[in-house]
Image: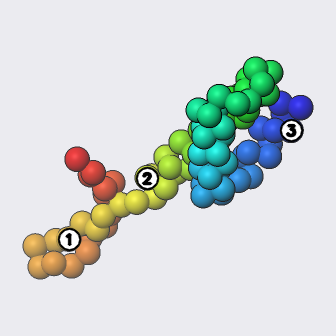
Amino acid sequence: MADSTNNDVKKLPFERAIEELESIVKRLEEGKVPLEESVAIYERGETLKRRCEELLAQAEARVSKLVLDASGKPTGTQPLDVD
């Protein structure tokens, strides 16, 4: 079942994955979930977290800034420096 769960998560867009992760965190914080279910949803939460991190890394890799020459014309791109 873990493999089918992982395959399911791999197909989720970022917004859906983060929404489900937030729901899991809320349920766990409330403390009203039985222990066995808590462990299962915690594991799914970890899988969702990894999916969100993966999607964010992909988005970050695609973000770049234009490099301009002395006259202001674009000459290429370079990674966006977010510092």
Q: What separation in Å lies between label 2 and label 1 (alpha carbons)?
A: 21 Å
* Image quadrant assignment for residue 64: bottom left
Q: Residues within 10 Å of mark 1 (few under 14, many from 20)?
A: few
Q: What separation in Å lies between label 3 and label 1 (alpha carbons)?
A: 48 Å
Tell me the residue at 10%/73% (across/down): 70
Q: Which percent across, then down, holds residue 30?
A: 62, 34
Q: Amino acid at mark 2?
A: Glu
Q: Which mark is residue 60?
A: 2
Tell me the residue at 84%/33% (across/down): 3
Is residue 37 or residue 83 the one in the foreground? 37
Q: Which mark is residue 4?
A: 3
- Tell me the quadrant of the picture where the N terminus can be found: top right
Q: Which mark is residue 68?
A: 1
- The nearer-to-camera label among 2 and 1 is 2
Q: What separation in Å lies between label 3 and label 2 (alpha carbons)?
A: 28 Å
For label 2, the SS is helix
Q: Which percent across, then down, holds residue 29?
A: 59, 32
Q: Amino acid at mark 1?
A: Leu
Q: Which percent across, then down, holds residue 63?
A: 40, 60
* Position of 15 relative to 40 (above/below): below
**Residue reaching furthest to the top:** 35
Is residue 68 or residue 46 the one in the foreground? 46
* Position of 59 relative to 57 (above/below): below
Q: Which mark is residue 55?
A: none
Residue 80 visible in the picture: yes
Cβ atoms at labels 3 and 1 below 8 Å apart: no
Sequence order check: which comes first, mark 3 or mark 2? 3
